[in-house]
Amino acid sequence: MEFLGYFFALLIGLILGIIGGGGSILGVPVFVYLFKIDAISATTLSLFVVGVVSAFGAIGNARHGNVDFKTALVFGIPSVFSIIFVRKIILPHLPENLINIGEIHIQKNVFILVMFAFLMLLSSIKMIIGNSNIETRNSSPQYPLLITQGLAVGMITGMIGAGGGFLIVPALVMLLNLEMKKAIGTSLFIISINSLLGFVSSENISSINWEFLSIFTFISIIGLIIGIRISRKIDGKKLKPAFGWFVLAMGIYIIIKEVFFH
């Protein structure tokens, strides 16, 4: 199972390199189901992996002028406040038995995994149907809406350890009229900052197995490098729907397992 887990580490970077996002959605399920790590710790580890791998992707885009740093600040600052609030205030104070209604008992770990699964479903649907409406832009930049979106993405990142690139990219294109390449590069920069700050503000850093996390992250970076090289020869848009179906299946599996067989 650990060998399969490291294979998925490679896949996370590979997908990110080929299609510019989406791979990080695999992080938490891999840590939980293949390495048997609890959900809260899995979100913390995922934040580190997502942050480091996205940073490598952002550096490459910045070299080609595809990162809008001003936009990253407008979107990123509200996100950072949301992430720190979630990691420092909300998560540590959630009770282990989160919901107790009659015979319905939902634990904190199960709640987080189910939330993550629903995010996977939403992400997979966007990958499958594509971004046909993403070019529908506003006539002028919509900064208030962008700040609101930043707050929402920060909550998601802080709670379940996912980068949220599938939400960030459309927001940057539709609300600020950024070109797609610049939106992807800026999104990677935002995700890297958000994820690493979310990781640093987590309560359970002291218990991390750094050797394991370093190996996992290193393998993901190798996957990213390979993915970027492949993307020069293969159109990532053609692979996106196939990966979307895979993410959809995983999301459904998590919901069924956690809700009906936990």
Image (cartoon, rainbow, N blue to C red):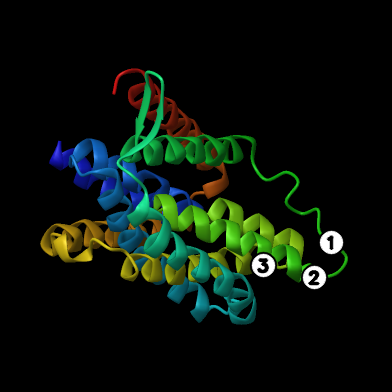
Q: Which of marks 1 and 3 is nearer the N terminus?
A: 1
The 10 Å Cα crowd at callout 3, few under 14, some 14 to 19, many 20 or more, is some
Q: Is residue 209 above or below residue 36?
A: below
Q: Where is residue 145 shown, x and y percent of the image?
A: 73, 63
**In-front residue for pair 190/79:** 79
Residue denoted by label 2: 141
Nearest the viewer among 96 and 51 is 96
Numbered label attached to residue 147: 3
Q: In which quarter of the image is the C terminus?
A: top left
The residue under label 2 is which amino acid type?
Pro
128, above or below 140, in the image: above
Q: In which quarter of the image is residue 1?
A: top left
Residue 163: image location, x then y, percent? 46, 57
Label number found at residue 79: none
In the image, what residue occupies the spot 75% across and 68% down? 144
Pointer 1 residue:
138
In front: mark 1 or mark 3?
3
**Residue type at tag 3:** Ile
Q: In this view, does 72 lie to the left or right of 22?
A: right
Sequence-wise, which precedes: disc 2 or disc 3? 2
Q: Do the residues labelled 1 and 2 touch (CB within 8 Å)?
A: yes
Is 63 rendered above or below residue 137?
below
Q: Do the residues labelled 1 and 3 touch (CB within 8 Å)?
A: no
Left or right: 141, with 43 as reference point: right
